[in-house]
Image (spheres, rainbow, N blue to C red):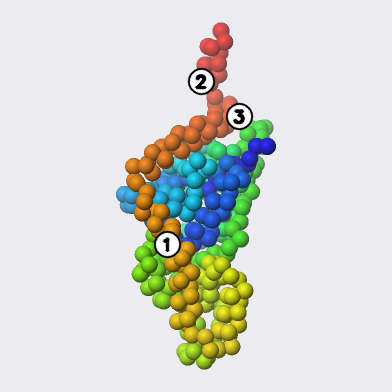
Amino acid sequence: MDRKIALTGDRPTGKLHLGHFVGSLKNRVGLQQTHDQYIMIADTQALTDYFENSQLVVDNIVEVVSDYLAVGIDPELSTIFIQSQVPALCELTMYYMNLVTVARLERNPTVKAELTQKDFGKSIPAGFLCYPVSQTADITAFKAEVVPVGEDQLPMIEQANEIVRRFNRLYNTQCLKEITAHLSETKRLVGIDGKAKASKSLNNAIFLSDTPEIIKEKVYAMFTDPGHLKVSDPGKVEGNVVFQYLDAFHPNADEVSALKSHYRKGGLGDTVIKSLLNDVLQQLLQPIREKRAQLKKENLFDLCFEGTQKARSLAEKTLSEVKTAIGIDFFEKRNFYQRNH
């Protein structure tokens, strides 16, 4: 039985952190056992808002791939490739741009939220506004039916399926496949400051490559309950970042539940729960950090080259099918005619 294709990826704008680990990386390690998985280093997409700092994007490609391998993504099971090195993706994007309006892109809740965060004002780069179209090209190029995402990305999948359905209906074809979102079981990880999400750009995350000293420093700086002034005071668990991280990473849910009850009653200090969380995270991240340190830069680029060659081949096949459906496969027809006459 053929395995379904899954596509996922990351923008190489910095090293990956615990939010990525619980939100997607653990999923990918599991998915590679059950799906044909393509993992994209989305450098083209990163340039939509880092076009004035392209070197940052270039430098972080190796960092992201290092994090992939360190957490257990196996290049024998998952195809890792660089987006900018697959030209068919740009051409597919151009064709799909005709199937969506600017107004529809502006209504996309994910785009609206990110535009607010980026604070572009009226100077929105066209590439940024249109990146849902580019994402549709990325997914459909590989005939991916499964895309692991967080809940905030569901509008992107909805918009991609709108483009797929319109293309198939308009050109009377089924060459593009509809997409199913694969949601993580873990809720989005908040930042260590208790605000928004853990994020590279907000500098409120614990990175997979952080040293033991930095991890401890970040854990002890975490937001807890401002009303929990004395150990004997009853404390609030809701909104308490330390407990949110314990929920996400502690292997014993019953122990965490007992700690929450104790904290609510009073008699449990913030230092105790922070010390426990530090121990849990140190144990989780030590083998990841050690494996990461053993990787060599040149080997990572060789790996990306091989994966990109495979990705190119599949994307070009889909592009050919799309052009045939539209009716602009002129030279494909000509070559076929010449070969047979």
Q: What residue is drawn where x is 64% and y is 48%?
A: 180
| Apparent side of residue 209 relative to residue 151 in the rendered image (left or right) | left
Residue 331 in the image, given as x and y percentages of width and height: 51, 20
Three-letter code for the amino acid on which mark 1 is drawn:
Gln
The residue nearer to you, when weighing 55 against 158, is: 55
3 or 1: tag closer to the N-terminus: 1
- Residue placed at 46% from the left, 38% from the top? 307
> Residue at point 36% right, 51% down?
294
In front: mark 3 or mark 1? Answer: 1
**Residue bearing the label numbered 3:** 325
- Reading the image, the residue beneath label 1 is 286
- Mark nearer the viewer, 2 or 1: 1
The residue that mark 2 highlights is 331
Q: Is residue 120 above or below residue 39?
A: below
Q: Quadrant of the N terminus?
A: top right
The count of marks equals 3
Q: Position of residue 44 (x, y in %)?
A: 42, 45
- The C terminus is located in which quarter? top right
Q: Nearer the viewer, residue 175 or 12?
A: 12
- Disc 3 versus disc 1: distance between alpha carbons? 51 Å
User: Within 10 angstroms of label 1, few (less than 14), some, or many (20 or more) residues?
Assistant: some
Tell me the SS state at disc 3.
helix
- Which of the two residues, 231 or 43, is positioned nearer the viewer here? 231
Does the image show residue 51? Answer: no
Residue placed furthest toward the top = 341
Q: Are marks 2 and 3 in contact (CB under 8 Å)?
A: no
